[in-house]
């Protein structure tokens, strides 16, 4: 039977097949909130929040570095608006591991508690290390995550932007401490344009490690609204895919979408990621953009037939 959600390894946390990325919420330098993007406001975010939840997309991903903590604060504000609507929300945030250079467990626990205060929760459903950039060992990172779990502050743990080798290493360290690695998230455009992405091995997948895709539509590149002559604004060069290649990919996505009821390029791209068994986490700045993503009741296809949003894989 096809799943309608995934349970994160080592926990009872259930996440839907599609999430919402919130890097843009509160971020000025890259996404232009309070700057070049006058349409990105608290009001537009309220629309994205409400419409996402109404569509069954209740998994929201953030990080302490997004907008210097502003994304977390905005999510806390959204949760406080309507307690009944927010009851189904599953939250994920990330720790910027460079802080571990100053101290080990204390730095992570201090950052985690600050994130919890901004989010307005007593524990986080999923806590991830934001990148393999710490000089500390994976054992030290695993110790810190284990301490957070023991303190009841996190329910599931994961990593972000780790290679397969790095993922295996920290998964082994977590296993020694009785923890399971629940997620590995990547900065990828899509499997369509990055066929050699850093996906977890089959062994990690079978162990329950679920790979979310943070840049499932390439920071907006696969929506079809950008091109070589009209590149994304701001500082969206973190994953700097040549727009000449992106134009070719978007043209193919349009062709596929037209064959299946006029689906948009972003819908086809998300379909690809979901059909691969990953959980895409596209950004949503307003209710209109959220509505262009499918309600989960519509499902997703297999990668061979691509009848977008018809039946889960």
Image (tube, rainbow, N blue to C red):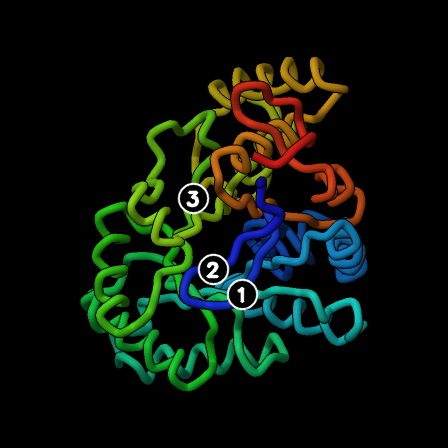
- Residue 297, image quadrant: top right
Lower position in the chain sequence, tag 2 or tag 3:
2
Relative to 104, say whether 30 is above or below. above
Query: Dot 1, crowdedness within 10 Å: few (<14), some or many (≥20)?
Result: some
Relative to 35, say whether 74 is above or below. below
- Residue 87, image quadrant: bottom right
Task: Choose between 163 and 218: the one closer to the eye.
Answer: 163
Tell me whether the residue at label 2 lies in contact with that at label 1, contact meaning CB atoms closer than 8 angstroms.
Answer: yes
Give the residue displayed 26% in from the left and 76% down from the top. Answer: 143
Lower position in the chain sequence, tag 1 or tag 3:
1
Task: Choose between 29 and 154: the one closer to the eye.
Answer: 154
Per the model, the C-alpha gap separating discs 2 and 3 is 20 Å
Residue pointed to by mark 2: 8
Tell me whether the residue at label 1 lies in contact with that at label 3, contact meaning CB atoms closer than 8 angstroms.
Answer: no
Residue pointed to by mark 1: 13
In percent of width and height, residue 211 lies at 43, 48
Relative to 143, say whether 58 is above or below. above
SS label for mark 1 = loop
Lower position in the chain sequence, tag 2 or tag 1:
2
SS label for mark 2 = loop
Task: Choose between 69 and 2: the one closer to the eye.
Answer: 2
Left or right: residue 173 compared with residue 278: left
Give the residue displayed 61% in from the left and 75% down from the top. Answer: 119
Residue pointed to by mark 3: 187
In percent of width and height, residue 17 lies at 59, 47
């Amino acid at each position: 039977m096809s799943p309608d959600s995934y349970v994160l390894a080592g926990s009872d946390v259930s996440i839907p097949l599609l999430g919402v990325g919130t890097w843009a919420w509160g971020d000025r330098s890259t996404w232009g909130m309070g700057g070049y993007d006058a349409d990105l406001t608290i009001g537009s975010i309220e629309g994205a929040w409400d419409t996402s939840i109404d569509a069954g997309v209740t998994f929201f991903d953030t990080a302490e570095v997004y907008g210097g903590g502003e994304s977390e604060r905005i999510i806390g504000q959204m949760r406080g608006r309507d307690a009944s609507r927010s009851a189904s929300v599953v939250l994920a945030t990330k720790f910027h591991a460079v802080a571990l250079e100053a101290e080990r467990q204390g730095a992570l626990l201090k950052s985690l508690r600050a994130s919890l205060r901004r989010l307005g929760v007593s524990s986080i459903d999923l806590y991830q290390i934001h990148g393999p950039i710490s000089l500390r060992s994976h054992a030290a990172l695993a110790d810190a995550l284990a301490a957070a779990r023991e303190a009841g502050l996190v329910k599931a743990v994961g990593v972000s932007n780790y290679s397969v080798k790095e993922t295996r290493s920290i998964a082994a360290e977590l296993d020694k401490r009785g923890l399971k690695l629940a997620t590995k998230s990547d900065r990828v455009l899509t499997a369509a344009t990055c066929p050699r992405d850093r996906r977890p091995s089959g062994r990690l997948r079978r162990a329950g490690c679920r790979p979310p895709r943070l840049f499932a539509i390439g920071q907006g590149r696969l929506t079809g609204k950008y091109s070589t002559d009209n590149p994304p604004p701001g500082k969206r060069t973190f994953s700097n895919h040549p727009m000449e290649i992106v134009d070719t990919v978007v043209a193919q996505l349009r062709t596929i979408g037209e064959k299946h009821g006029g689906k948009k390029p972003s819908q086809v791209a998300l379909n690809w990621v979901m059909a691969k068994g990953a959980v895409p986490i596209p950004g949503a700045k307003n209710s209109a953009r959220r509505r262009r993503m499918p309600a989960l009741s519509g499902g997703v296809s297999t990668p061979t037939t691509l009848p977008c949003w018809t039946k889960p894989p």
